[in-house]
Amino acid sequence: MKRKNETVRISIIGFGYVGSGVAEVVTRKRAEIARKHGLDLKIVGVADLRGVVVDEDGLSAKTLRKLSAGERGVGSWKEAAAEGLTSLDLIKEVEHEVVVEATPTNVETGEPGLTHIISALEAGRHVVTSNKGPLALEYRRLTELAARRGRELRFEAAVGGAMPLISLVRQNLAGNGVISLRGILNGTCNYILTRMAEEGLPYEHVLKEAKELGIAETDPSKDVEGTDTAVKLVILANSVFERNATYKDVAVAGITEITTDALRLASEAGFVIKLIGEVNKEGFLRVAPRLVPKADPLNVGGTLNVAKVKTDLAGEITVIGKGAGPIEAASAVLSDIIWTAKHF
Amino acid sequence: MKRKNETVRISIIGFGYVGSGVAEVVTRKRAEIARKHGLDLKIVGVADLRGVVVDEDGLSAKTLRKLSAGERGVGSWKEAAAEGLTSLDLIKEVEHEVVVEATPTNVETGEPGLTHIISALEAGRHVVTSNKGPLALEYRRLTELAARRGRELRFEAAVGGAMPLISLVRQNLAGNGVISLRGILNGTCNYILTRMAEEGLPYEHVLKEAKELGIAETDPSKDVEGTDTAVKLVILANSVFERNATYKDVAVAGITEITTDALRLASEAGFVIKLIGEVNKEGFLRVAPRLVPKADPLNVGGTLNVAKVKTDLAGEITVIGKGAGPIEAASAVLSDIIWTAKHF
C-alpha cells in the first residue's frame, strides 16, 4: 500500500552559491525523499538580482540547471522571467509552503534577507535560511513573529554548514541543559592555521594560497578578523541559550597576528592554536585564538568545523563536519525543509 | 499566558544502572522539561527482579530514590511493592504512555526485554529502550509491530550512550543518503587501547586496572572480544541502512591479541590502533582492530565513543561523546521520551 505524497512547494530567494545548491539537491534527491519521507518537493519559484522565475507546477530540473549560477548567465533568466514580478511578489503572491532565504549576508542591515524573512512569515510561509545577517541582528523579532504566525523559522545552514549543531542541541540533546559551546566555526581560518602549523609557512603566504584555492575570499577580512565567527556565536547565543545578544556583545580577535613562531612554541608544548568561538549560558561571548591540546577533539584540521557542546547530563558532545561548500550548506537547508514539512 | 502541560506517564522496567538513572534525570529535570517542552513527566511504575511499585499519580522523588539500586536494597521494594503485580501487569494494566525498557541485555534470547517491548507495543504504549538484545535479534519484527500499532520505538541509548547517532542520521541528516558508518562503539576497549599506547603497558595490566576502576566488568569478554560492538553494528545496519542483519552477519575480531609492540610500531608510522566497527549500505559489517591516522577525527582517547557518518551531501560528519555511564544513557532515554511525547 502506497500512501500519497504530501506536496511541499518551495521558493528560493537568492540563487547563488547556496540557492542553486539547494535547487540541485532537491532535484537530485526528489525521488528518494518521496520514498523515505513521503514528501514531494517542488520548487515553484526562484529569484535573485537577475530576475524572478515562477512555475506553479514546479520548475523543471532543466530550467533550474539553466538558471544556476555560472550557466548561461542572465540570458536564461531574461527568457524565463515572469514579467515585472519581484522577489517580494514571489514570496507573497505565489502559493507555497516554504521560503528558502539564501541571499548574501549583510551584518550591518540584514537586508535584503530581513525583509524577505519578515514578508514570508507574514504571508504564512515557513522559512529556512542560510543567511546569518537577519538572525544576528533581529533574532528575537523574527522568532517571535514566526511563533505568532505559527510558522517555522529554521537556520541550521547559517552556523557550521553541513555540521548539524543547532538541531543537535535542540532535538537530540533535548533533555539536556546546555552549559557552553566552544568551537571552530570558520573553515578559512582553520585552513590557514593548520597549513601554517604543519608547513611552518607564514600567514601571508598561506592566505595567498587559500585565495588561489578559493578557500579564502578576495577580501578575507570577515573571516580572518573573526567577524564571521562572532556573527555565528550571536546566533548560537540567541537560539541555544535564549539570549538577546548582538554583535557588539562579542569580544573579537582574529588570526592576523598569529606567527609561525607562536604555532611552533605551542606545538612544542603539545598544543595547536585555533580560532575558537565560545559562548556560555551566562552570556560570555568571545572569539579569539586559543591554545587547544593536540589530543582534544577540538583539534581538527583543514577547513573542517567543530563544536563541543557541554551539557549537564550527556557530558561533552563534539560534532565535526564541513563548514562550507554549496552542497554541504544545501544539505542543511534540505534537512530543515524536511523537518518543517513533517512537523506542520 | 501559560499553556497547560501535557502529562506523559512513564514506566521503567529494569531498575538497575540505566533505569534508576532515568528516574534520577526525570526527577532532576522535571521542572525544566515542563518549562522548555510543555511536558509533565510522571513515573507511574517501576519494576525489576526485586518487585513492582506503582503509583498512578506518579511516584515521588523520595520513593524513587529509595528504590534506586544500592539504596537500602530489597527492603524498600517489599515495603512499597504492589502485591502480586508483575512487570507485564504494569506494562499492560497500568495506564501510561511510555515504557522505558532497561533490563540487562541478553543477545542470545533477547529476554526479558523482548517480551516487555512486544507487550508494551501491543498494549498501545510507546517504547524507549537501552536494551540491545531485542533490537539485535528481532529488529524488523519490533519495528513492524510498532508501525502497525502506530507507536514509537526509540533506542538511542542502545548505541553509543550519550552520543546521539541514530537520531543524528535520521533527523539532522534527513536529506542525506548514508554511505557508511565507522566508529568506536565500546568505551572499555578504547580505554584499554589508549592506556596501552600512551603508557606502553601490556594488555593484561591495563585490563586489570580497568576492572579496578569499574571501566571493565568482572567478565569483560563481551567488550574485549568485540561482541558488544558487533551487536551495536547490527542495530545500526538495521535502523540506518534498513537491512535485516543479525549477529552472525558480522565479521568480529577483538582486542585481546593487541600487543604494546604493535601499538608502538603503529605510533611510529603516525597511527593509533582502535577497535573499529564498520557498516555500509552494501551490508558490509566488520568489527576489527584497525589503524587510524593520529590526525583523524576517529582518534579519540579514554572511554570516549566516536562515529563517522559518510553521507552523499554533507560529506563526513563525526560525533564524539561518552558511550557509557548511567546519567549519560539516561540522557539519551530522556531525549527519546521528549521526542516521542512531542510527536504523537
Image (cartoon, coloured by chain):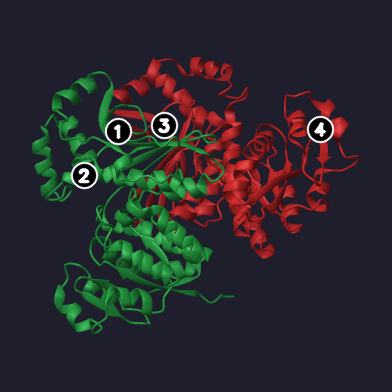
Chain colours: A red, B green
Q: The disc numbered 4 marks a residue on which chain?
A: A
Label 3, label 2: how far apart the Cα atoms are: 36 Å
Q: Tag 2's secondary structure?
A: helix
Disc nearest the viewer among 3 and 2: 2
Labels 3 and 2 touching (C-beta < 8 A): no
Disc nearest the viewer among 4 and 3: 4
Q: The disc numbered 1 marks a residue on which chain?
A: A
Q: Tag 3's secondary structure?
A: strand
Label 2, label 4: how far apart the Cα atoms are: 60 Å
* Residue bearing the label numbered 1: A295
Label 4, label 3: how far apart the Cα atoms are: 39 Å
* Residue bearing the label numbered 2: B223
Relative to the observer, which residue lies in front, B187 or A167? B187
Relative to the observer, which residue lies in front, B331 or A31? A31
Residue ID at (23%, 85%): B83
* Residue bearing the label numbered 3: A274
Labels 1 and 2 touching (C-beta < 8 A): no
Q: Assess disc 4: are there few (<14), some (14-19) or many (≥20) residues with their C-alpha within 10 Å of its C-alpha.
A: some
Q: Earlier in the sequence, mark 4 or mark 3?
A: 4
